[in-house]
Image (spheres, grey):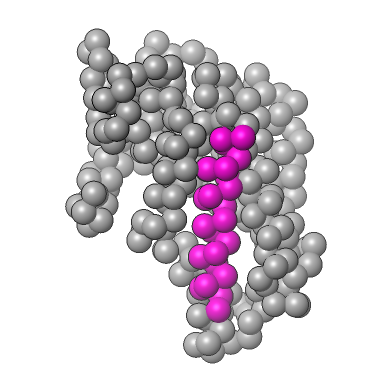
Amino acid sequence: MRFLSWFALLGCFLLPLKARAFQPDPLPDAPLPHQKSDPDTQKKDVTQTSAGRVYAPRYDRVVFPGELAHRLTVRDKFIFAARQTIEPINLTPAIISAGYGEYSNGDPKYGTGSGAFAERFGAAVLRQDSYRLLADGFMPILLREDPRYYRLGEGTLARRFFYAVGQAFMTRTDSGRTVPNYAGLLGRGIASSLTYTYYPAPSANARVVLDTFGTSVAGDAGLNILRELTPEEVFKRLKQLHLRVTGE
């Protein structure tokens, strides 16, 4: 996994220096964060309409072209991050991580067996929740950045692919400007560093922290690719299925 660390670090240094190069050409319906909204609307997590345009649900992780995005308040960002820690679907990456660690006997080095798998799973849940709370909650609040993914939705497959990868390193501010993704990268870096406090001694070292950080950034880029390239109809059907399963 060490090559993922180099990939992440390379992106951290190069993409901020060429921020304008990664900004997509303006689209007629490119979504911009909504500056103000009716107080009653603030309390609703449902799709609204205004002047013929559609508002994305406040806590959706993906904003589609043509949708208006509510500007997230401090409270909204806390809720946005907290919702991700309690959604059952988010246990899937932790299960996969624990299973791969058990298979390869990799870091964190808890050994093998059912007890080791349980410890790996617990560590993976704690690590991923740290990512979500820091990269999608606390840091976006402090740095006034928007943790949502804005889907490009148009252009060639290659352009959309590289846009999705770039969004692991670039993001929007609350006012809609494109900037380096300081909140996401710093949040993931801090969360990766926290593994020192709960990983077993053989895995509590700088190499593991670096590998963990690189893997998390690469995973974020991979998730963005799925968000961008999954057909919109399929994406929204999966979302509706998720809402029915969770009862939201």
Residue at the spot x=52%, y=57% of the render?
A: 129
Which residue in the rendered view is the most extreme toward the right? Answer: 206
Q: Is residue 42 above or below residue 183?
A: above
* 5 left or right of 60 in image: right
Q: Quadrant of residue 202?
A: bottom right
* 121 left or right of 217 in image: left
Of residues 134 and 119, the one drawn nearer to the viewer in this rendering = 134
Q: Is residue 184 above or below residue 195?
A: above
Q: Is residue 55 above or below residue 223?
A: above
Q: Is residue 31 above or below residue 218?
A: above
x then y, percent, for residue 3: 72, 55
Residue at the spot x=45%, y=37% of the render?
A: 75
Q: Quadrant of the N terminus?
A: bottom right
Residue 163 visible in the current orientation? no
Instruction: Provide the residue span drawn in magenta.
Output: 119-142
* 199 left or right of 241 in image: right
Residue at the spot x=58%, y=22% of the render?
A: 178
Name the dominant secondary structure of the magenta segment: helix
